[in-house]
Amino acid sequence: MKPIAGGRGEAGQVAAHLPVAPALPRVRQTTRLLENERVLGWVLLVPTIVLLGLFIAYPFVRGVWLSLTSATVGVPGAFVGLKNFAKVWNDSIFQRAAYNTIVYTAIATVGKLGLGMWLALLLNRHFKGKRLVRASMLLPFIVPTVLSTFAWKWMFDPTFSVLNWSLYHLGIIQARIGWLTDPAIALGSIITVNVWRGMPFYAISLLAGLQTVSPELHEAAAIDGANSWQRFWRITWPLLLPVTTVVTLFSVIQTFADFQLVYVLTGGGPANATHVFGTYAYQVAITTGLLGEGAAASLAMFPILFVIVVIQLWYIRRVEAA
Amino acid sequence: MAGRAGSGAGMVEGARWRKWVFFYIPLTVFVVGTLFPFYWMLVTAFRPDAELYRPWRAVNNTPFWTLHPTYEHFVYLFRETMFGAWLFNTMFIAIISTLISIFCGLLAGYSLARLRFPLAGALGTGIFVTYLVPATLLFIPLATIVRNFRLGDTPWSLILTYPTFLIPFVTWLLMGYFKTIPRELEECARIDGASRLRAMVQIVFPIATPGILSAGIFAFTLSWNEFTYALVFLQSPQQKTVPVGVVSELIRGDVFFWGPLMAGALLGSIPVALMYSFFVEHYVAGLTGAVKG
């Protein structure tokens, strides 16, 4: 693993003092300007700033504005203050969606971290076919989520579920389970798919971290009589903590703002039991066409996302400074 | 349980049964659990309808394999839907948006990693933050903006918006690469009379080729897999990408065409899976590099 920090090295200090003027006979004004670090630095960033400004910063501002208006599709709407937020806040489906999002994020994150760590530890050993196994483990993360989720939806099919077939023939169940149609377990099924899809990302990132943990540490601890459980908690876990934290925070953001998995598996049903922020906002804004209310619903995610991003930035800074 | 696997490398000490319980069995469960949905996709794609829709308790039901494989679902996909067009659209959009992102990310990454200028740190942080902004937060206002720019229902609505989540990633990945390249290399070229831009393009960029490849592969798969923006911005069947086309055109009301759906899912997954299998190491480098920032 490369060091997380990697700041400007001492070589930079030396370079900064070298003369910059090229000894060409006739240097055009622009060329000379581009030799200036301050100018070139900004010029190189122009394409990025333009694209991110147009399609991230501007939409964000516009989203805030939309959420304060009664806009619907094709109608600009009027300024209504915080009315949309109040309406959304008091909507029982929104409350359910907020609750679901938190449960979904919490359980899925713990599941992905636990299983991902376990898989990383297994893959960190030497065995035949290791490269092949490691490569195939990442497949759920590579393949378009929507398409693999459809395979799961088909496995969860109320009538033709292969899971029900297997459980029935193993003698575990008598009646079929409505994996996605029973409101009591639908969210659980969705969480399972999310864990399945996200776990490899944890495993491979943690594996990269594991490979930097020196085996000598484990040998020394083993000689001192530490069992493998103690060795994990006293050596591996603390050393992996920076990678684990960054991976987890990143994944929490993605899970919290998930849309496609729920959209494909249940669309928020049955009876709005499995909506998360993303699908609820989609239903209000795109399906129903209430842009203002939908924007308010999706902005409701913002405070929590903001806090996670700040923690993420703060943590990365701290790790870099250390 | 995870603790058993704590030993860094080497074999598991102790009795043979322990190795089975703590290593082979868990690993097998992981492998089967991870790959089964893909196997299921494959079997369904080749299974005739008569077998697909057999009641779950039927005696002659053999769900895990089929003795009568058929191409009918693939034929349906290309004859009755615009799957070919979806594949082309997805490919086109992924390639162009990846190229745009690599271009922007190379310049931005070089600038932030190598040059000193006011606000460089703040801009770096700003770009990193945009990386963390999820599509779900922006798709509603973006839908109105895309319409106002008259990009709605065209590939350009995606080609121009995908870089918003690709550029930050590419920039951060390449910054890491640029920082590892010794400045002396560039300085030598500049002493020989090369301009800053020339030194950047001819000296620094070629050395960063592995990083560019990683970033490119990762960006390509990300845009190939994108769903939310594509779902919201595209309406006509011939404009859709594979993920959106499969979702919206192979379901009529409550009826799911599972055969063609799985055939489409399979065909839509193969290009990224192939690309990934050729460049596993680059992909993993991109993935872990993205996390470390």
Image (tube, coloured by chain):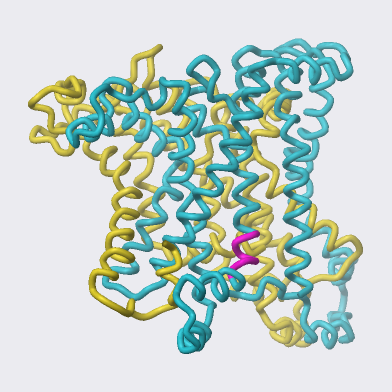
Chain colours: A cyan, B yellow
Residue depicted at 66% across the width and 30% down the height: B139
Residue A234, percent from left and from top: 57, 74
In the image, B185 versus B12, the foreground residue is: B12
| Quarter of the picture holding the C terminus of chain A | bottom right
In the image, residue B109 above or below residue A140: below
Residue B227 versus residue A110 in the image, above or below:
above
Quarter holding the N terminus of chain A?
bottom right
When the figure is inspected, residue B115 is found, relative to residue B84, above or below; the finding is: below
- Overall secondary structure of the magenta section: helix
Q: Quadrant of residue B142?
A: top right
Quadrant of res B144: top right
- Residue B158 seen anywhere in this rendered image of the structure: yes
User: Could you say which is closer to the camera, residue B226 or residue A86?
Assistant: A86
Q: Is residue B126 on the magenta stretch?
A: no
- Can you tell which quarter of the image residue B254 is in? top left
Relative to residue B90, is residue A199 depicted above or below? below
Q: Residue at x 45, y 67 (%)?
A: B3
Q: Residue at x 75, y 30 (%)?
A: A299
For this rendering, which residue is in front, A312 or B237? A312
Q: Which residues are magenta?
A: A240-245
